[in-house]
Image (cartoon, helix red, strand yellow):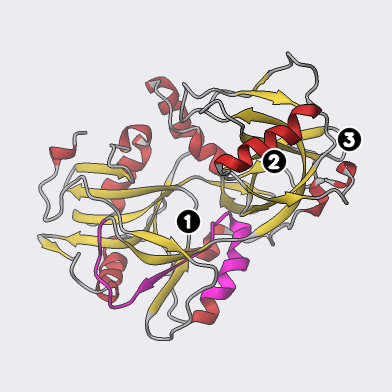
Amino acid sequence: MTMEAVDLPVTPPVEPMLAKAQGTVPEEPGVWSYEPKWDGFRALVFRDGDEVVVQSRNGKELGRYFPELVDALRSEVAPRCVLDGEVVVPRNVSGRVRLDWDSLSQRIHPAASRVRLLAEQTPAHFIGFDTLATGDRSLMGEPFRVRREALVGSIGDGQWCHVSRTSENPAIGTRWLTTFEGAGLDGVIAKRLEGPYLPGKRDMVKVKHARDADCVAIGYRIHKSGQGVGSILLGLYRDDGELQMVGGAASFTAANRLTLLAELEPLREGDSAVNTAEPSRWNAGADKRWIPIRPERVAEVAYDQMEGGQTNGAGWQRFRHTVRFLRWRPDRDPASCTFGQLDVPASYDLNDVLETR
């Protein structure tokens, strides 16, 4: 499907409206609409009859990776509309439905046969949270109140396409920040009730989860400039005593990169020891080599959430995003850096986060 296949009042590519980060949920009553922040692939859906285009955040065609979702969009959304939302993959975990980032990320694959197999094994859903056009009318200049009403009318009560919940109550928005994390969500978004849709502009507010953890420094990568440390590899001890890599801390200043190298290089496990991480699905050419060090230093880091297996250390987990290095903790014993210290969100079913009809 090409981007030119649709004849709508708003045509692809369109930059999605973005959000700026804030530490707390904005509380002006009557100004904001609050909704859960979905942890999936941002997607703009253009439906013009049988023609459906699913556009990614960066303007690329996304539908070829999700053929089952394209079919669902033909059946479950209005015949002519442009919707903003998120592509997600829900999975049943211990009797509750939650988002599964790992399964979603595996859907981006170059082989058509693999795409078809995963479409059957881990089918995707579309969560709509804004409307850019319906019929022959662009809604981008309309306030969110109007666009939200059009959204509810554009998505039917089907199996694969849904409408995200919203509230105008700031207390509810604040509560969602913690309660819905257990369903695999990523925080809370606040939109101006009277605001238009502004492509590429950070006119929304996003509030994400913030936590800290003590991790063992297990290695480092040299910065791409060749000068100093580019990232510190981090680990946590599992219940079976094994030290498991859980991610990395990066984004150091040039001066800090050199300081960190001076601190970590004496801990190298031999001058020639170099390990290789798994290749990246997103950047196949990325250099994944890293230098292992003796697990003697403890780093305090800030993170938002974990992803992966079980939370008791019996499975595998890792940080969802690159974490922020806060400080060294010489008062901490590396053996105390276990999965048990992590904040485990309460379990919530994904269906609790969807708009009820």
**Local secondary structure at mark 3:** loop
**Local secondary structure at mark 1:** loop
Q: What residue type is labelled 3?
A: Gly
Q: What residue type is labelled 2?
A: Gln
Task: Point out the stretch of residues depicted in magenta.
Answer: 173-199
Residue 241's disc is 3
Q: Is residue 61 left or right of residue 268?
A: left
Residue 246, how many percent across, how many down? 69, 38
**Local secondary structure at mark 2:** strand
Q: Which residue is rendered at x = 34% and y = 74% of the image?
A: 192
Looking at the image, is 96 positioned above or below residue 312? below
Instruction: Out of 327 and 86, give the one closest to the viewer.
Output: 327
Q: Which residue is rendered at x = 19% and y = 34% of the image?
A: 2
- Give the mark nearest the N terminus, 3 or 1: 1
Tell which tag, 3 or 1, sits nearer the viewer. Answer: 3
Mark 1 residue crowding within 10 angstroms, few (<14) / some (14–19) / many (20+): many
Which quarter of the figure is the N terminus placed in? top left
Instruction: Out of 154 and 16, give the one closest to the viewer.
Output: 16
Q: Is residue 191 magenta?
A: yes
Toward which corner of the image does residue 155 lie, by quadrant? bottom left
Q: Which residue lies furthest to the bottom in this view?
A: 29
Residue 215, how many percent across, how many down? 77, 44
User: CA–CA distance between discs 1 and 2?
Assistant: 20 Å
Q: Which amino acid does label 1 sit on?
A: Trp
Q: Name the residue under label 2.
A: 317
Q: Name the residue under label 1.
A: 38
Q: In this view, does 96 lie to the left or right of 270?
A: left
